[in-house]
Image: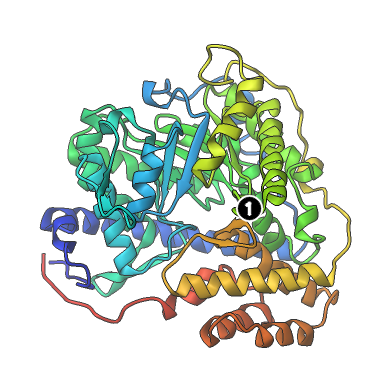
Amino acid sequence: MSTVSFAPTVEKENTILTQECVTFLVKLFENFNNERLELLEKRKFFQKALDEGALPSFLKETEHIRNSKWTVAPIPKKLQNRTIEITGPVDRKMIINALNSDADGFMADFEDATAPSWDNLINGQINLRDAINNTISVIHRETGKPVTLKADFRKLATLNVRPRGLHLNEAHFIVNGQEMSGSLFDFGTYFFTNARKLAEMECGPYFYLPKLESHEEARWWNKVFEFSQKYVGLPVGTIRATVLVETILLAFRMDEVLYELRQHSAGLNCGRWDYIFSFIKKLHRTTVLPDKTLVTMKTPFMEAYVKLLVETCHKRGIHAMGGMAAQIPVRGNDELNKKNMEAVYQDKLGEAQKGMDGTWVAHPGLIPIARKAFETVKPANKPNQIEVQKDYKVTQFDLLEVPSGPITLECVKDNVITCLQYLDNWLKGLGAVAINNKMEDAATAEISRTQLWNWINHRYIKAEVVQELIEKEPSVGETAKKIMKDIVLCKDLTDFMILEAYPYLKSSTKITPKL
């Protein structure tokens, strides 16, 4: 008999973690956790090869997949039009605003935009359940009146959910003495609670899959999907998932990922900020990028990545989704706001011109701007650009071309402030933070962190300079400073910032019921 322990800190917890749901989570853990751990070990093997001078490349053994003709399963009606998707954390107000917005879809994020405290996770699951059942509301702080969904759930922005990546555990949910996988916990709780209802409404369940590094990891997710659908009695293919291509290794495995998920695929997404972070992290022995402001979607290796993603998706009959522009609306400064909005428009126009079928925004105020950019390019009366076939002929060299440019003290200071302020807010439970008129999440903070480490270790800047900047920053707490010094001034590059910060966030309260 399995034992499970979890932290009883949320009033409505038992309405989500019912006995039946917990049993399902344990089944997922027992069937898939060992393979997950093996896949994480494989990541270390590939990193060792890169550290020894190997370069990411297209696999010879999967050449037949890339060169053969096949397509993914037909796209569900609800996912045909994904021109604008808004993204954000799983708090109640965000969910209502996003679903009520004029976006075509909403990506509710348990990963980079949510600090994984137990309260945030459980309340996030409750919020999504209530939204799907049209029982969600919040009290408007000025009027004191309830704010609810403006229409039936089926008529609102299409809901996608992003669970945490394979590398993250859930320390508040223990199965037989082992921490639960964060991926399996987020996916499993949401799926078991809502899948039948969503399928009945022909609204999903739909997911985004983050941080994958290989097509074997996509195969793992496909097996999780098949098991889960069978468990609750849904047909294979009911689940659809969009994979975020946000690691440099996965850029060379796009065809293979779509093939592994071909019954469940909803396409690929350009997770641009994590992709830059991965480029630095994976190639840190030989590669140094200039100031982050100089690494844009027009930088050759980023442009090549976008082109390959569009070409691959359209060849397989599925969506190619764009990423997130950093700018957000600015209040009280018309000139800066106009500059930011023009930057967003040009960014989205560039995505549309390259063939993207849709894009992401972080704020409702950006939806009209992004839509205007796409409608300028998208064929009239078409929900997407999938029929637009591109022949970009992207090479290994194109994907690995390192841009030149300066490393400035101004960017060093900005990286320190961004990373410190994000960490400080994350420890308070916030996963998405507006800093200097830009929306920062774990991915953008990771760019700042890895750039600093990389520049120190390649002797472009002195560790003492960074340490002094960290210690002198007045606006953050000592815990954030300690974590940042641990991950920036260390000898070996740590894999993920959040893994180092997580012990400071987790609760120590546990109970141990028996199944």
- Is residue 110 shown above or below 452? above
Residue 474 locus on image (x, y percent): 62, 84
Q: Is residue 31 left or right of residue 423?
A: left
Check disc 1 and report its element: helix, strand or loop.
Answer: helix
Amino acid beneath label 1: Trp
Say which residue label 1 marks.
273
- Is residue 487 shown above or below 353? below
Q: Nearer the viewer, residue 51 or 457?
A: 457
Q: Is residue 513 left or right of residue 465?
A: left
Q: Residue at x 11, y 58 (%)?
A: 19
Residue 96 locus on image (x, y percent): 34, 45
Q: Nearer the viewer, residue 475 or 507?
A: 475
Q: Residue at x 74, y 81 (%)?
A: 466
Q: Nearer the viewer, residue 68 or 310?
A: 310
Residue 73 picture quarter = top left
Q: Residue at x 22, y 72 (%)?
A: 9
Q: Is residue 49 visible?
A: no
